[in-house]
């Protein structure tokens, strides 16, 4: 039986096939954030001293970059002083380690943000950085599954057998690495690895995706046409990174200073682009192995 091809939105990030052929259970996931729980599995051991405070961040319905920005704002420090190992889903309850340079325990204890908790774990002389983890543990609730219990259990058994016979499942990088509604990070990363800084910046600013708001699409069309001042005027306020880049490019004499525009992004996001391109290449290789029927443990 041939492999089942994945939909277009997954093809964009290098996921070409599904590993199992049994029909799924159906149902609804993420009906509420607590239905999707993610806990980072860390490879770090913290200590009592060090210039970085290490804390456990648990958030609900928060984008990782946005919550890091909010924490830095509440502390009154640069967001570049905060580090984390990976971005986590927004519509979920997620737990992960973060590091904060040169912050005292009582300062962090005063930070109170809705749907966010911070627990101090210790200190270290090394920040938490991208890739600084073993993986993630998930607890996922599926609701509104239709059918009789016997038929549902039979499907679960069939899928489990397929996974066991295949010696596992393909460990693809998921959509959060690339952008859920706008999977662009790997495209920007590809340009960066080729030394194409202008193309990287303009791709981030002007590439349009179907699920974006009409205001965002209009602003991106103006970026594509080179009308950057006009684009800045109508770029939605929540697209703060695009606005930061445009603010650099519209400065007198800065029209071609794409280095300054790129530097307006948080350092963690800058690093993420190349990581995302690596993830995209990994997904393509894994898809090619599946097509050639090469086992996951070979």
Image (tube, rainbow, N blue to C red):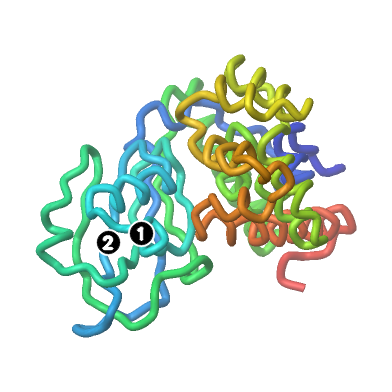
- Element at badge 1? strand
Q: Nearer the viewer, residue 289 or 155?
A: 289
Residue at x-position 34% and y-position 44%: 93
Within 10 Å of the Cα at label 2, are there few (<14), some (14-19), or many (20+) other Cα atoms? some
Q: Nearer the viewer, residue 32 or 224?
A: 224
Residue at x-position 75% and y-position 37%: 6
Q: Is residue 60 above or below residue 274?
A: above
Image spot of residue 97 (x, y percent): 34, 64
- Element at badge 2? strand
- In the displayed structure image, the side of residue 226 where residue 100 appears, left or right: left
The picture quadrant where one finds residue 180 is top right
Within 10 Å of the Cα at label 1, are there few (<14), some (14-19), or many (20+) other Cα atoms? many
Q: Nearer the viewer, residue 47 or 94?
A: 47
Mark 1 vs 2, N-terminal side: 2
Q: Where does label 1 land, which residue? A: 96
Residue at x-position 38% and y-position 78%: 44
Q: Is residue 215 above or below residue 235?
A: above
- In the displayed structure image, the side of residue 68 where residue 131 appears, left or right: right
Q: Which mark is residue 11?
A: none
Q: Where does label 2 land, which residue? A: 56
Q: Does residue 52 appear in this view?
A: yes
Q: CA distance from mark 1 to mark 2?
A: 6 Å
Image spot of residue 200 (x, y percent): 73, 48
Image spot of residue 277 (x, y percent): 72, 56
Q: Does residue 21 appear in this view?
A: no
Residue at x-position 67% and y-position 41%: 204
Q: Are marks 1 and 2 in contact (CB under 8 Å)?
A: yes
Image spot of residue 60 (x, y percent): 31, 40
Q: Quadrant of the C terminus?
A: bottom right
Instruction: Name the residue furthest front.
Output: 252
């Amino acid at each position: 039986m041939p492999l089942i091809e994945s939909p277009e939105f997954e093809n964009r990030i290098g996921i070409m096939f599904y590993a199992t052929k049994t029909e799924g259970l159906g149902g609804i996931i993420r009906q509420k954030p607590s239905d999707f729980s993610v806990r980072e599995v860390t490879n770090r051991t913290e200590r009592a001293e060090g210039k970085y405070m290490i804390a456990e961040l648990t958030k609900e319905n928060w984008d990782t970059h946005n919550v890091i920005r909010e924490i830095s704002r509440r502390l009154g420090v640069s967001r570049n002083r905060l580090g984390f190992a990976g971005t986590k889903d927004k519509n979920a309850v997620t737990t992960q380690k973060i590091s904060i340079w040169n912050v005292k325990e009582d300062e962090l204890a005063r930070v109170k943000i809705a749907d966010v908790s911070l627990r101090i774990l210790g200190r270290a002389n090394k920040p938490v950085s991208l890739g600084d983890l073993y993986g993630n543990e998930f607890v996922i609730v599926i609701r509104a599954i239709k059918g009789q219990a016997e038929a549902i259990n039979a499907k679960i058994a069939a899928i489990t057998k397929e996974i066991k016979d295949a010696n596992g499942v393909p460990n693809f990088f998921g959509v959060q690495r690339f952008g859920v509604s706008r999977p662009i990070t790997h495209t920007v990363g590809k340009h960066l690895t080729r030394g194409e800084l202008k193309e990287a910046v303009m791709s981030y600013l002007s590439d349009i995706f179907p699920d974006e708001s009409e205001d965002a699409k209009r602003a991106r069309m103006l970026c594509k046409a080179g009308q950057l001042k006009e684009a800045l005027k109508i770029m939605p306020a929540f697209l703060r990174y695009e606005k930061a880049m445009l603010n650099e490019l519209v400065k007198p004499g800065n029209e071609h200073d794409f280095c300054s525009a790129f530097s307006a992004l948080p350092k963690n996001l800058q690093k993420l682009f190349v990581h995302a391109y690596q993830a995209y290449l990994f997904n393509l290789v894994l898809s090619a192995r599946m097509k050639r029927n090469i086992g996951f443990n070979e």
